Image (cartoon, rainbow, N blue to C red):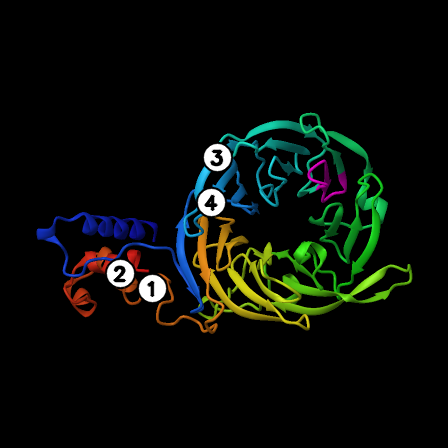
Amino acid sequence: MRRLALAATAVCLMAAAAPSGAAPAVTPPEPGPGYVKTSNVTHVATLPLDTDSIGGRVLGKDFFLRTGKGITIYDTSNPDLPVPKGFVAVPQTPNQEREDVDTNGEILVTGQAYTGLLHVVDVRNRTTPTILATLTGAGDHTNTCVLRCTFVYGSEGTVTDLRDPAAPKLAPVNWLRELDVRGSHDLTEVKPGLLVAASNPVTYIDARNPLAPRLLARGPLPDDRYTHGMSWPRGGQDRFVLGGSESGYGCLTPEDGTFFVHDTRRTKKDDEGVPNWTRTGDYTISAGLPTEGKAPTSELCGHWFDPHPSFKDGGLVAMAWYGFGVRFLEVTRKGAVEERGFWQPLPGQSSAVYWVSPDTVWVTDYTARGIDVLRFDAGKPAQRDQRHPGVFRPAQADDEVRARLAGRGPEHAAAHHTEDGSLSELASRWVCRP
């Protein structure tokens, strides 16, 4: 099959490069990325430069992206065209240490849990970021800035004093143990010193004194789902706290990956006297076919999400769902969750999604796509786009090319011919047509 694909690709390239006098009867279209989508989503572009990212950070007109190579800073001024403007190489271990970087616009923190290294990067000059310091024993899986990056809270409980960014120090406290939290994948600072932890139950923390954190509230969950990320829109002023859970390898049950909502205005104190928020909505995806906007299986389920900038006591959320692509969700005024559209790469594993303008998101991919630029039209219905699905379609060409390249007899070829009987036309349909 590999030799078949190489041969067909070669034919496609030769057809595209042929002089006008020898042009094939059917001109092959330009190659493009494959996907299935609803009609209210437009695929604008793919930038295949940073191809193995699991997350970044948007701040103002800048997008800070972590990959296996290091940190790339992109200009978001033109939402349709990601433009790199700075890069710094950062040491990298295999696997997942390319997730949720954090920055205050002056320094950026990124860690490696396997080696325990926390890297502090000076990003004041966006074109020439530099590694300012590295501290052993401080790097957790994810690392969150607290109080304008004067401290860092790690997902494994580590607290780092970063008041002197060039000389970071481990603090003699572990926030997980201090608050009796069983574990966390990430924290989100919703306003200075106030954080929501992606734990089970969800934990709301007062870290305005970073060395003596206090528990403020919890968000109970109905099962043992692994909470992945949290958001409290409008700097903690919104009615709803938003969360997402993740699991790996299968994604066959609702608990494998969910987007959920808690109502902070409906609380009830537990036996410890801690206010508990009320969960109002859950959204999950069942396995299915790509033509249904689903996946028969997925490497991982549910990942980073981003509420729309206009979110106010309800609104639009974009969530990356690995093999299921990007889901555009709406949180209703009552806290329920409804899907409004999707975009599913074929192939691809959408790992994170970020609003860079009111109608445009950038999607990072865990595998090899790079950055996909999507435009979402909230005014259009979420109908599956059958007329322009944007997916590579082998049609009959798969069998035809197999037969031709296998050298079968003319009687077989005659039974499987195209309009002009040319292999180049077959190959162009099989390899190049989006």
Residue in front for this viewpoint, 279 or 12: 279
Name the residue beneath numbered marker 2: 429
Distance (Cα) linking label 3 and label 1: 38 Å
**Magenta residues (range):** 146-158
Of the image marks 3 and 1, the number of the one nearer the N terminus: 3
Q: CA distance from mark 1 to mark 2?
A: 8 Å
Identify the residue under disc 4.
51
Which comes before the other along the chain, label 4 or label 2? 4
Taking the image as shown, residue 170 lies to the left or right of residue 66, namely right
Mark 1 vs 2: CB contact within 8 A: yes
In the rendered image of this protein, does residue 328 appear above or below residue 47?
below
Percent x, y of residue 9: 27, 50
* Amino acid type at image mark 2: Arg
Nearest to the observer: residue 57 or residue 301: 57
Residue at the spot 50% in from the left edge and 50% down from the top edge: 364
Report the mark closest to the observer, 4 or 3.
3
Q: Say which residue label 1 marks.
A: 393
Q: Residues at badges 4 and 2 in contact (C-beta under 8 Å)?
A: no
Badge 3 element: strand
Q: Which mark is residue 171?
A: none
What kind of residue is marked 1?
A: Arg
Labelled pair 4, 3 in contact (Cβ < 8 Å) = no
Q: Secondary structure at mark 4?
A: loop
- The numbered mark, 1 or 4, whose residue comes first in the sequence reads 4
Within 10 Å of disc 4 (Cα), the crowding (few <14, some 14-19, many 20+) is: some
Q: Position of residue 264 (x, y in %)?
A: 76, 64
- Identify residue for label 3: 86
Residue 225 appears left or right of 349: right
**Left or right side of 414 for 427:** right
The residue type indicated by label 4 comes to: Thr
Which of the two labelled residues, at mark 4 and mark 3, occupies the earlier sequence position?
Answer: 4
Residue found at x 80% / y 46%? 176
